Image (cartoon, rainbow, N blue to C red):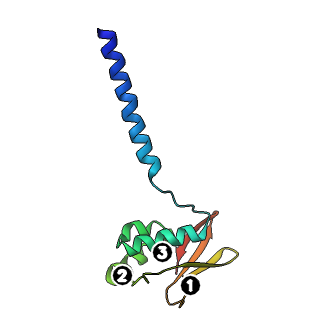
Amino acid sequence: MAKRFHRQQRYGSVFCLLIICSSVSCTTAVDRIDAASVASAFVSALSDSQVEQASQFVNADERDDFLNDVNRNLPEIPADFDVVVKANGDRAAVSNNDSGSFRINLIRRDGQWWVTK
């Protein structure tokens, strides 16, 4: 009887571990080597007013300035934002397909894209 209980307990632990692993793997990771992915994640976070999350995509040297600026005046994100990337070496510009009124500049550092001024 003790062995049977021990075996059930072990299967329960494995089941809990599988649930935890599947929950973790369901979160979407951002492809940092793709400028469009970084820009999309940044815009999505700003659209949801998740400034702290958006700041994780900002160049570390400019993150504090970004947080100060955004906390004073959160930019208005177009509802139909369509990412159009124009890359030139280690720099890229991302703008709205229609008007170009909303623009994000990116820089590539150590193979990863970051939002910059």
Q: Secondary structure at mark 1?
A: loop
Q: Secondary structure at mark 2?
A: loop
- Residue shown at 40%/74% (left/top)? 46
- Residue shown at 40%/29% (left/top)? 14
Give the Cα separation between the discs numbered 2 and 1. Answer: 21 Å
Residue 108 higher or lower than 26, as above or below:
below
Query: Which residue corresponds to mark 1?
Result: 97
Q: In the figure, residue 88 lies in which quadrant? A: bottom right
Q: Quick one: label 1 or label 3, which is nearer the N terminus?
A: 3
Q: What's the mark number on residue 74?
A: 2
10 Å crowding of disc 1: few (<14), some (14-19), many (20+):
some
Q: Quadrant of the N terminus?
A: top left
Nearest-to-viewer mark from 3 and 2: 2
Q: Quick one: label 3 or label 2, which is nearer the N terminus?
A: 3
Q: In the figure, residue 37 lies in which quadrant? A: bottom right
Find out whether the residues at labels 1 and 3 contact each other: C-beta distance under 8 Å: no
Q: Quick one: label 2 or label 1, which is nearer the N terminus?
A: 2
Q: Secondary structure at mark 3?
A: helix
Expressed as whole percent of the image width and height from the top left, the position of residue 91 reads 64, 77
Query: Which residue corresponds to mark 3?
Result: 62
Q: Amino acid at mark 3?
A: Glu
Find out whether the residues at labels 2 and 1 contact each other: C-beta distance under 8 Å: no
Nearest-to-viewer mark from 2 and 1: 1
10 Å crowding of disc 3: few (<14), some (14-19), many (20+):
few
